[in-house]
Amino acid sequence: MTRRTVCFLFLLASLWSVQASSQDKIILGYYPSWMKGSYPHTVIQWRNLTHIAHSFIFPYADGGLDLSGFSLYPELIQAARQNSVGIVIAVGGWDVVRTPRFSQMVADSNARRRFVQNLKNFCLTYGYDGADIDWEYPSASDRPNATLLFKELRQAFSDAFPPLTLSIAAPSADWGSRYDWSVMKDVLDWMGVMTYDFYGSWTTKAGPNSPLFGTAATTDQGWIDNSVAHYLAKGMPASKILIGIPFYGWQFNATTLFAPSTGGVQMTYNRIAPLLQQGWVRHWDSLTRTPFLVNATATQVISYDDSASVTEKVSYLKQRNLGGAIIWAIGQDYLNGQQPLLSAIGAAMAKTTSVAKRIDAEVPGEFALLQNYPNPFNGQTVIQYLIRTAGEYSIRVYNLLGQEVDTLVDGYHLPGRYAAHFDSGTLASGVYLYRLIGTKMTLTKAFVVLR
C-alpha cells in the first residue's frame, strides 16, 4: 500500500466521521414553563430538536427544590418521548433572590448531598432524562464547592438506570475561573455556551446580540467564534460545546449598528419580524454575520437573528465539529402558525452538503481548487480546496450540459485548507465538472465517474 493511498484512506475515514457526526448534533431548545399557554406541546416542531430543557426550578439553601413559578407538564414529557426527543429539567436561570441560594447550598456538604439526591429523585419521578444546571454564575470563591457539587451529581446520575445526563449553561467566557474545567470537561455530557446578550441595555453602543465573528476593535463585548476558542483552550472537547442561538434581539436608541446608544429593550423574534412590513429596513453586517433593522427615521436599531444568520451559525458549528446548539427560547419565533427560525435550524442540520473539514487553518497564499482523488472513481472521492479570505463558498457539481447535479458544500468558510467528500451515488458514467464558487471567484475542474 503506497503512502498516498494510506493518507487518502485516513482522510476518507476522517470525512466519514465528520459526515456521520453532523447527524449526532444536539439541538436543545429551552422551554420556559410560562410559555405553556401560548406555545403548547402540540405545536412544537419536534423534528427539529433533539432535546428540550424544561425551565426552571431552583435550589433552596438547605438542598430542597423550589418549584415556585414552575408548572409540571406531563404532556410535554410524553410528547418528547413519542418524538424521540430527550427532555431535561433546567435548574436555575437568573433570579435576584433564588440564584444566590446555589452558593449557600454548595457550601454545606449536607445541603449539597440533599440537593443531589432530591434532583436525581425529581428526574426519576417525573421522567426527565437529566438536568441542566444554569447557575449564572458561581463566583471564584464558589469554585471548590461547585466542583464538589458537579462531581457528586455526576456520580449520582451515573448510578441511575438509565444514567441521567448532566449539562450546564455557561457564560460566553469564563474569565473569572468560575469552574474547574479540568473536572467539568469530564463530568459534563455537554455545555451550552450562552453566546447572546453581548450587547444590550447595559452597553453604551448598539451592537449585535449574537455575533458569529468579530474583532476586539468592533465587537468589543465578544463574539461566538471567540467564545468557542476560549473554551477549547480551557480543554473542553469540541464535541461537548454547544453554541447559543437566540430567538430574540435588542432594540437600541441609535442610528445604526455600533453607533452610540441609550437604553435597550429585549424583543422576541415574533415581535421583530412584523416590523419589516412597517417601514423598518433590514441590513446585513458582513463582519458579524448578523442582520439588523433600522427604522424609517434612523433613530432606532434592532439587532436580532433571522433565518439567514441562524443557518450560518449551524453551518459554523458543523464545520467546527461542535456538539450542537442551545436555543433561548423555542416558541419565541412562533408567528402565524410558523416557526421560521426553528425550521431554518432543522433544515440546516439536515443538509449533509454543508459539511466540509478544515484540515489546515493556515491562511493559504491563494485560492485553489485541487484535483479530486481518486480520479477516475466509482463510489467515493475527496476534493480539497484552499480558501484565502473568509466568506460564503460552495462546491457544486454539473454535467456537461451545464445542469447542476449536486451541491457538496454551501456555507461560510474561514481561511484554510478544506476537504469535502463526494459520493457518485446514482450518477451515470461520464465526465462532470465541479466548481468552487465564491463572491468574486469561480474555479472549475473535472472528474470522471466510471461504472
Image (tube, rainbow, N blue to C red):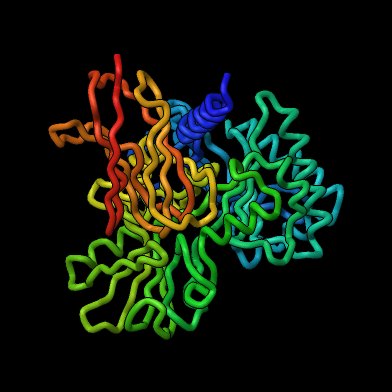
Residue at 24% over, 19% down? 429
Image quarter for residue 356?
top left
* Left-right relation of 33 to 255: right
* In the depicted structure, whether residue 125 falls above or below residue 430: below
Q: Residue 236: where, in percent of width, then height?
A: 67, 48
Is the C terminus in the top left, top right, bottom left or bottom right quadrant?
Answer: top left
Most extreme residue toward the left, as rendered?
401
**Can residue 13 be seen in this snapshot?**
no
Name the residue furthest front.
2
Quarter of image, res 177: bottom right
Residue at (71%, 34%) from the top-left corner? 157
Front-most of residues 157 and 290: 290
Q: Is residue 364 left or right of residue 45?
A: right
Q: Position of residue 153 (x, y in %)?
A: 75, 41
Counting from the top left corner in percent of width and height, residue 159 is at 75, 28
Give the residue furthest to the right: 109
| Quarter of the picture holding the N terminus | top right
* Residue at 29% in and 39% down: 445
